[in-house]
Amino acid sequence: MRSSAQNGDVKIELGRRYRFAASHRLHSAELSEEENCRIYGKCNHPYGHGHNYVLEVMVSGKVDPATGMIANLEELDGFVESEVLEPFDHKSLNSDVEAFRATVPTTENLCIEIFRRLKPFPKAKLERVRVQETSNNGFEYAGENPDGFEG
């Protein structure tokens, strides 16, 4: 008799970590200069500032009985590379990433944008993304949530 894992009936989550460096300026066109300075502080510096971000991607799926995996790591890595790392790494989020030309590139918004870009991964279900901005600040996003928040 085969175990449920061998039958592919067990749902497993896979976490994978990536790194990228990017700069941003926290500044809203909807706020005055004074409000931007008060709300964003040093993060509103006119020339921006940078972070070495750590991105954690969690996907889930059933274990494929033939491979013993829920997703091929090379396929996941290639997808994350093309959808997130290539467009974001060593870039100015404000000027180089279309999504942030009209949206303040806070790490909260960065999580939402990364989730949107990775959701179509065809080999497993995207559960959530986590972006560690600094040793003190980390943000996590899991898409729509029952409380009515949506991305």
Image (spheres, grey):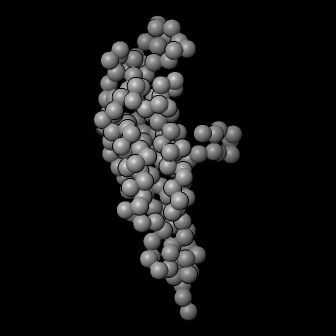
Residue depicted at 30% across the width and 35% down the height:
90
Q: Please give left or right for residue 54 compared with residue 40 in the image.
A: left
Depth order, front residue of 12/19: 19
User: Horizontal and vertical percent for residue 117?
Assistant: 50, 45
Residue depicted at 46% across the width and 7% down the height:
34
On the image, which quarter does residue 24 sit in?
top left
> From the viewer's perspective, is residue 74 above or below residue 48?
below
Location of the N terminus by quadrant is bottom right
Depth order, front residue of 11/82: 82
> From the viewer's perspective, is residue 76 above or below residue 82?
below
Q: Please give left or right for residue 28 compared with residue 150 in the image.
A: left
Location of the C terminus by quadrant is top right
> From the viewer's perspective, is residue 41 above or below residue 133?
above
Residue depicted at 34% across the width and 21% down the height:
48
Residue depicted at 33% across the width and 45% down the height:
19
On the image, which quarter does residue 144 sit in?
top right
Can residue 86 be seen here? The reply is yes
Q: Please give left or right for residue 142 compared with residue 133 in the image.
A: right
Can residue 55 be seen here? The reply is no
> From the viewer's perspective, is residue 22 above or below residue 67?
above
User: Horizontal and vertical percent for residue 54?
Assistant: 36, 44
